[in-house]
Image: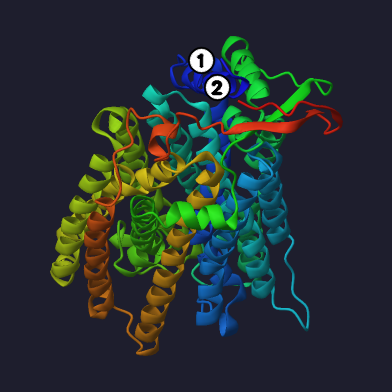
Amino acid sequence: MTPIHDLDERRRAALAEVDNASFSVYHVKVALVAGVGFFTDAYDIFAINIASTMLAYVYSPQNENTLPFKYDLGVKIATPVGTLIGQLIFGWLADIVGRKRMYGVELLTIIVGCFAQTLAGEARAVNVIDVIIVWRVVMGIGIGGDYPLSAVISSEFSSTKFRGRLMTMVFSAQGWGTLTSVIVALILVTAYKPSLDVSKIDSNTLDNIDVIWRMLIGIGCVPACIALYFRLTIPETPRFTMDIERNVQRAAQDVRDYLTSGTFVVDPDAVVQRVQVPQASRNDFLKYFSKRENLKVLIGTTWSWFALDVVFYGLALNSSAIFTAIKLPFPDDSDSESPFETLKNICISNIILSAAGLIPGYYMTFLLIDSWGRKSIQLMGFTLLTLLFLIMGFAYEGLIKTTPGKKAFVFLFCLADFFQTFGPNTTTFIIPGEIFPTRYRSTAHGISAASGKLGAIVMQVAFASLQNNAEKSNTTDQENWPFLGTILDIFAIFMVTGVFSTLLIPETKNRTLEDLSNESQEGFVEGVATHVETQEGLIVGNTALTP
């Protein structure tokens, strides 16, 4: 057997060991370390849904209790803008310098951006909202990096038979982060109730609300700080070592160590023998994605995520405004001007959405994703969401005229949340982490995720503009805000496009990552480098091995 053929066989044998491995404690560790990041991401993203109302109380001009249009929009789109940037940059860097080297850097960026918001102040030349927006962009860049890194690390460490469940478990932390943010907000608001439960808002009330939003945002640093050490010490994935660092021998040893003890031991004096395999480059990228079957997959993952996030963030970042406007779920309190009642009702509304819709959807996906398949669940989700938004959109004006109708609207709203997570919200995260070759897996996932955040930005700008126009017309009764029914109908159109984009994507269940890459694995190792190195990169001799 030639040296090249031997290394090619060792590569495939090592990959087979990972693909056929039984579930172990180390898989649990990977899920927890990656999941804490998504918990933090969701907490920091969706806490602003409530915090923006608090900012409106404290910093609105002339005590109007609403932020000017540009500031309200800026606060809500700052994080998606940063996230888009982070997904592209960190996705690319993870394929260039390694998953391990970048993992933790993005979490540190989140911590800095999150903590800095709590210290935001105002001066003659600086508006406090502008400062918050800048730091939310920084925080968003870190959050964006978490998407491709966590997806790729969890997929590359997982075996074929439970890869979908492991990745779903990681992503489901998003639901718990969202729920925790509103629970924390409710606890803080309740703790400050004696100072907030007044019909007239005075300076003491505003001071306390200012403390609440800063504490709410700042607490988001806690889980990130706890996870930082584990992020920085997580080992490099064997697939990166094998296919990008081109060190088959080291990767094979890592796999054996990983499967037996769950740890990696790096010997800096070990001899490194680089192999010749397809390497990432501009020309290779264009060559790979110029093939019709590969390009259509990238189009499918990017548009599916775009269509989904138009709806997901359109609802998630505006649910408080929607339920406050239609005076649900607490119509008896709707006439109260107390900040406590307003903030309490917003918190409880969002708890209902998370507990009744988001979180159950994740775990339904967890149960079925490796049996039903990703594509089937995504198609089902987009189809049912189309029907739900058509019903809510066309029946909107009739539903909100009566209390039973409003409650039916809330039920449909929760059902839509359920089929987002038991559907495309989860699968759009999983599929790009599986379906591309190792050298482009993180980059392509970042591109797909960034397209989603572009959808979120577009929808948020549209929603805020329509809401601002309605407010300018001095309309205070939501029954006279027809744009919400129209937006729900537009959501249905995007869900239809999601159905068609999903048809471009192959089913990924029970298939290895290498099979999904659409590249032949026979003879993947093309040759052996003409020099040998140590782990520290010193050349110690020549081999010039040939077949």
Residue 37 in percent (x, y) is at 58, 41
Image height check: is 375 above or below 535? below
Label 2 sits on residue: 5
Q: Secondary structure at mark 2?
A: helix
Residue 187 visible to an observer of this rendering: no
Judge by depth and name the residue closer to the eye, 479 or 157: 157
> How many labels were placed on the picture?
2
**Precedes in sequence: disc 2 or disc 1:** 2
The residue at the far bottom in this view is 473
Q: Position of residue 352 (x, y in %)?
A: 35, 47
At label 2, counting other C-alpha atoms closer than 10 Å, the crowd grade (few under 14, some 14-19, many 20 or more) is some
- Identify the residue shown where x is 61% and y is 16%: 262
Residue at the location (50% across, 74% down)? 73
Q: Residue at x 55, y 71 (%)?
A: 57
Foreground pick, 30 / 407: 30
Q: How far is the residue under mark 2 from the one under mark 1?
A: 31 Å
Q: As displayed, is residue 475 above or below residue 37? A: below
Q: Amino acid at mark 1?
A: Ser
Task: Name the quarter where the N terminus is drawn.
Answer: top right
- 69 versus 530 height, above or below: below
Residue 1 appearing in the image:
yes
Which kind of residue does numbered mark 2 sit on?
A: His
Query: Which circle marks residue 24 in the picture?
Result: 1
Q: Are marks 2 and 1 in contact (CB under 8 Å)?
A: no
Viewer-nearest of discs 2 and 1: 2
Classify mark 1: helix, strand or loop: loop
Side (left or right) of 181 relative to 375 = right
Mark 1, Cα crowd under 10 Å, few <14 / some 14-19 / many 20+, is few
Query: Where residue 544 sits in the image (x, y, percent)?
Result: 73, 29
Q: Give the residue displayed 49% in from the left and 51% down from the top.
A: 444
Q: Which mark is residue 211?
A: none
Relative side of 118 to 387, left or right: right
